[in-house]
Image (tube, rainbow, N blue to C red):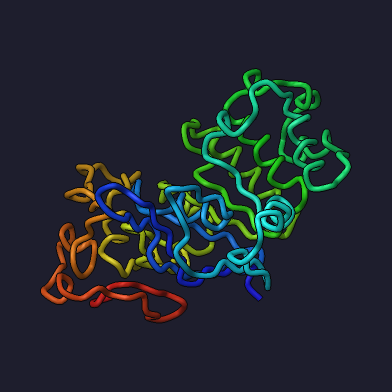
Amino acid sequence: MNALRIEGLRVSFDHPLGVVRAVDDVSFALRPNERFGLVGESGSGKSTMALAIMRMIRPPGHIDGGDILLGDTNLSTLSGDAIRRTRLAGIAMVPQGSMNALNPVMRVGAQVADAMRDHGVQPRDIDQLMARVGLPAGTVEKYPHELSGGMKQRVCIAIAICLRPTVIIADEPTSALDVVVQRQVMRTLAVVQQDLNAAILLIGHDMGLMAQFVDRLGVMYAGRLVEIAPIAEIVRKPRHPYTEMLIASLPSMDHKDALRGIPGLAPLLRDLPSGCAFHPRCPKARDRCRAERPLPREIEGGVLAACHFA
């Protein structure tokens, strides 16, 4: 059984100029104990996907369809009370902005205890929980503003694992952190994953970080999933032109070349081009790409790509 399975998920936002489809018929599965990465440019739908999985989409956004299966539980059909009980206990999220996620007027230990009490669990062993994520003794008595960015992020990890969930969603957990602290945070995530035997869905922009951490990678573009493959395979032989250009844009440590970006801009989600949404920026586009939308299809060895010519 998969730890998490997404089937045909669709998320839209109502806008005065038209409906914006932020997540468009996305399907993928997370295996037990797996590290699955999700990358794409800003606006590709990654964070919206995370919020939808947690059932935290708020108006004017709404989930239009699809299923979110945590084990054998369909989160899409749970009541408000039931989904609140499932968060932290079954599935938890490490947010992107730790300073915004933490209450600035509560000591961090009290915030962990509050999360436990909200689920009917008597707070206990909070100092040990802090030690498990690499925080020194006495951290429980600190306020968020007294901690560094990396320490605040590890407090968020401590809150996320306090009830031992089976799935952890980490939404750009290293954004705005320097590379040394990024390494510490990712090492902390790896340690707690092994401790809990949990699956991790890591969302971000950094292909280099993904290559070092995840087992499989999904690539999103314009709200759609365009490729899924084992990380070694996707780096060695990307099948979708967008994935290929993302990897080609990474600077090389072996030789100095001019930095290469992806020409053009991502399309407006309320006004997507016909056919493949990437075709206006794709150097390999043909007439079929402009007329017909490609659907994800399995190529070989667990590789899926939404490209007519992959």
Residue pushed farthest top?
146
Q: Is residue 289 left or right of residue 255?
A: left
Residue 246, given in percent of the width and then of the height, sits at 31, 54
Residue 87, given in percent of the width and then of the height, sits at 68, 52
Residue pushed farthest left?
287
Residue 60, given in percent of the width and then of the height, sits at 42, 48
In the displayed structure, 240 sits above or below 119; it is: below
Quadrant of the frame with the C terminus: bottom left
- Front-lying residue, 79 or 249: 79
Q: How many marks?
A: 0
Decide if residue 62 is in sight here.
yes
- Front-lying residue, 274 or 213: 274
Question: What residue is shown at x 55% (from left), y 30% (from top)?
Answer: 100
Residue 158, given in percent of the width and then of the height, sits at 71, 40
Question: What residue is shown at x 68% (from left), y 45% (from top)?
Answer: 160
Question: What residue is shown at x 56% (from left), y 48% (from top)?
Answer: 170
Residue 102: image quadrant is: top right
Residue pushed farthest front?
16
Quadrant of the frame with the N terminus: bottom right
Q: Is residue 115 left or right of residue 232?
A: right
Decide if residue 194 is in sight here.
no
- Front-lying residue, 33 or 106: 106
Question: What residue is shown at x 55% (from left), y 50% (from top)?
Answer: 56
